[in-house]
Image (spheres, rainbow, N blue to C red):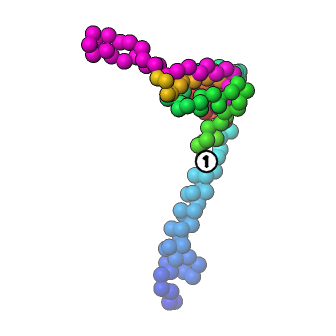
Amino acid sequence: MEKSKGKIFGRIFNLFDIILLVIIAALALLLILSRGGKGESGPVGTSGTIEYTVEFTNLVGDSAYSIQPGQHLTDKIKKYDIGTVVSVDVHPNRRQILDYYDETLRDAQSDFTNSATVVITAPCVETDASVTIGGGYVL
């Protein structure tokens, strides 16, 4: 009986075929086991509405006035639903600076840039570990 080149177990399989079949079977088993654990639910949170404040600083010109109550905000990169604008307070950009002569802090106001304090509401799910607003954005 003559052996074919590269065939260890007769005419059916060679060593490469067996290694390939073992790898495919291991991947299939891993896929089945990883899908099986997804049925369990994680920590359950309470649903509600959250209100949070964001301050935008150094807005040039009248760009701060383009934010209006009722606008819906969405993250441009990951497409997260951030919420709906409730109120906007536009004010001149202010900072505390150190006065080098008497070494005290004083308020300085910019005439060229504005700041906007924006109050946003969004539906959320709160757990012990985090607060997640619509679309999956974790606060």
Magenta stretch encompasses residue 97: yes
Q: Note whether 74 is above or below 125 in the view shown.
A: below
Q: Note whether 80 is above or below 64 in the view shown.
A: below
For the point 59% across and 32% down, the residue is 63
For the point 53% across and 32% down, the residue is 60
- Closest to the observer: 106 or 25? 106
Query: Quick one: SS at disc 1?
Result: helix
Residue type at mark 1?
A: Leu
**Outermost residue to the front:** 111
Q: Position of residue 112 (x, y in %)?
A: 49, 28
For the point 48% across and 81% down, the residue is 6
Could one spot residue 87 in this view of the protein? yes
Magenta stretch encompasses residue 101: yes
- Closest to the observer: 2 or 137? 137
Q: Note whether 7 is above or below 65 in the view shown.
A: below
- Closest to the observer: 10 or 25? 25
Q: Quadrant of residue 75?
A: top right
Q: Main secondary structure of the magenta part?
A: strand
Using residue 127 as the reference point, say whether residue 70 is left or right of it.
Answer: right
For the point 50% across and 89% down, the residue is 2
Q: Residues within 10 Å of mark 1 (few under 14, many from 20)?
A: few
Using residue 104 as the reference point, say whether residue 48 is left or right of it.
Answer: right
Magenta stretch, residue numbers? 82-109
Q: Quadrant of residue 11?
A: bottom right
Identify the residue position indicated by label 1 in the image: 33
How many discs appear? 1
